[in-house]
Image (spheres, helix red, strand yellow):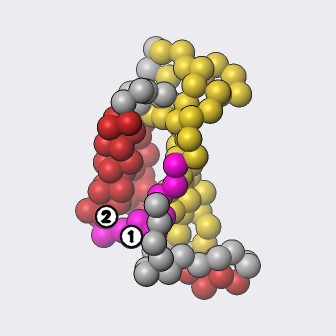
């Protein structure tokens, strides 16, 4: 399974529970399809570089977060469908880091080990 990194901008909301639910939905979608979530990071709330329109709403602030995961291309297509329909998601992009973990390590990127603790 290829290793991917997703960066997502969610519509800013004072309730942290809505962002947490979006991240949980995304991670469980990957894991229920047999994928592995390796790392979840919150980048915080930032002013968007320009006004962004999504689902008939204009956004000026966004909550940024990233997700590192392994999954099949079929699951990736279904994940894109889920994110496209969610009104909380403003923008997202998914980049393939490598076909195997050895490809990522060969490029000098750090490996994420299963025993690592993340906050």
Q: State which region is magenta.
A: 33-42
Query: In the figure, is residue 91 to the left or right of 14?
Result: right
Q: Nearer the viewer, residue 39 or 55?
A: 39
Q: Nearer the viewer, residue 16 or 25?
A: 16
The residue singled out by tag 1 in the image is 36
Q: Residues within 10 Å of mark 1 (few under 14, many from 20)?
A: some
User: Which tag, 1 or 2, sits closer to the chain's start?
Assistant: 2
Whether residue 93 is visible, yes or no, is no
Magenta stretch: dominant SS? strand
Query: In the figure, is residue 112 to the left or right of 87?
Result: right
Whether residue 14 is visible, yes or no, is yes
Q: How far from the left and from the top, in percent, is residue 57? A: 48, 15
Outermost residue to the right:
108
Numbered disc 2: secondary structure: helix
State the residue at coordinates (60%, 57%).
95
Q: How far from the left and from the top, in percent, is residue 13? A: 43, 27
Query: In the figure, is residue 46 to the left or right of 79?
Result: right
Q: Residue 39 lies in magenta, yes or no?
A: yes
- Above/below status of 70 relative to 102: above
Q: How far from the left and from the top, in percent, is residue 79? A: 39, 50
Numbered disc 1: secondary structure: strand
Outermost residue to the left:
32
The residue singled out by tag 2 in the image is 31
Label pair 1/2, CB-CB below 8 angstroms: yes
State the residue at coordinates (48%, 28%).
11
Q: CA distance from mark 1 to mark 2?
A: 6 Å
State the residue at coordinates (56%, 41%).
44
Q: Residues within 10 Å of mark 2 (few under 14, many from 20)?
A: some
Q: Quadrant of residue 105?
A: bottom right
Q: How far from the left and from the top, in percent, is residue 53? A: 55, 19
Q: Residue 103 lies in magenta, yes or no?
A: no
Query: In the figure, is residue 28 to the left or right of 14?
Result: left
């Amino acid at each position: 399974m290829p290793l991917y990194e997703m960066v997502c901008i969610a519509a800013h909301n004072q309730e942290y529970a809505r962002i947490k639910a979006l991240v949980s939905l995304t991670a469980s979608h990957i894991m229920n399809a047999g994928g592995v979530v390796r790392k979840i990071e919150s980048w915080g709330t930032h002013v968007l570089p320009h006004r962004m329109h999504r689902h008939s709403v204009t956004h000026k602030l966004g909550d940024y977060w990233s997700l590192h995961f392994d999954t099949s291309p079929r699951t990736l297509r279904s994940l894109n469908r889920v994110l496209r329909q969610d009104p909380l998601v403003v923008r997202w992009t998914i980049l393939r880091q490598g076909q195997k973990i050895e490809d990522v390590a060969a490029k000098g990127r750090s490996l994420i080990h299963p025993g690592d603790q993340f906050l």
